[in-house]
């Protein structure tokens, strides 16, 4: 009796699972451009008085695809300002209260992201209320962030030596707002 019940349950299970649509895979049918962009997308917030005031999504395009690996550091930056009107959001990065820099350098070019752009439908973390921009910064061969580390001789704890080394594999994108403060994201070059 148990064998018959088990066999009947097994046959019914195969029938129903074989005839259903596999919905779980539809989330993974995005293009390889989307998958690559997801790896190089980060999010940061500006918090002011314990409230999120500005949300920033950044995709580092140079690492996403070779077509953007030119003489510029290319990013797509999405800015959402909480509690602002649509008109203020549309002009968010062009607003004089924002300052955007990459390792201390100003951007060279700032353009609104249009639906015709190849990345428009391939952006991870797309926020429909945010304004998106394609931002370009000059590449700098000598762009090196100096990191400091203290080296202690374990036999003599009072004797320390500061070691300075440079790391030119990190890009730090900083967004500063005159009222709310600043946030930054770091990207490693590949």
Image (cartoon, rainbow, N blue to C red):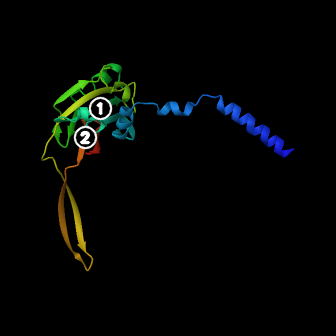
Which residue sits at x=14%, y=42%?
A: 140
Element at badge 2?
A: strand
Q: Is residue 28 left or right of residue 172?
A: right
| Total numbered labels placed on residues in the image | 2
| x then y, percent, for residue 163 | 18, 64
Horizontal side, residue 186 vs residue 72: left or right: right
Q: Quadrant of residue 139?
A: top left
Could you say where residue 167 lies in the image, as x and y percent from the top left?
A: 20, 53
Q: Quadrant of residue 88?
A: top left
User: Residue 63: percent from the left, percent from the top?
Assistant: 28, 39
The earlier-in-sequence mark between 2 and 1 is 1
Q: Nearest the camera: 165 or 36?
A: 36
Query: Which residue is denoted by mark 1 in the rendering?
Result: 77
Identify which residue, 34 or 113, lies in the foreground: 34
Residue position marked by numbered label 2 in the rendering: 173
Q: Quadrant of the C terminus?
A: top left
């Amino acid at each position: 009796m148990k064998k018959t019940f088990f066999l009947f349950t097994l046959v019914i299970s195969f029938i129903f699972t074989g005839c259903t649509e596999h919905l779980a895979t539809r989330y993974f049918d995005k293009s390889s451009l989307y998958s690559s962009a997801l790896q190089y997308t980060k999010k940061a917030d500006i918090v002011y008085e314990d409230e999120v005031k500005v949300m920033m999504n950044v995709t580092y395009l140079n690492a996403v695809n070779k077509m953007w690996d030119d003489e510029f550091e290319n990013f797509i930056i999405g800015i959402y300002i909480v509690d602002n009107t649509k008109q203020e959001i549309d002009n968010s990065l062009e607003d004089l209260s924002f300052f955007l820099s990459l390792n201390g350098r100003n951007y060279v070019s700032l353009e609104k992201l249009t639906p015709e752009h190849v990345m428009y439908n391939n952006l991870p973390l797309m926020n429909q209320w945010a304004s998106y921009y394609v931002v370009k910064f000059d590449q700098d061969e000598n762009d090196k962030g100096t990191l400091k580390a203290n080296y202690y001789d374990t036999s003599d704890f009072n004797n320390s030596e500061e070691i300075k080394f440079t790391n030119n594999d990190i890009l730090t994108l900083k967004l500063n707002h005159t009222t709310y403060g600043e946030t930054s994201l770091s990207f490693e070059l590949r």
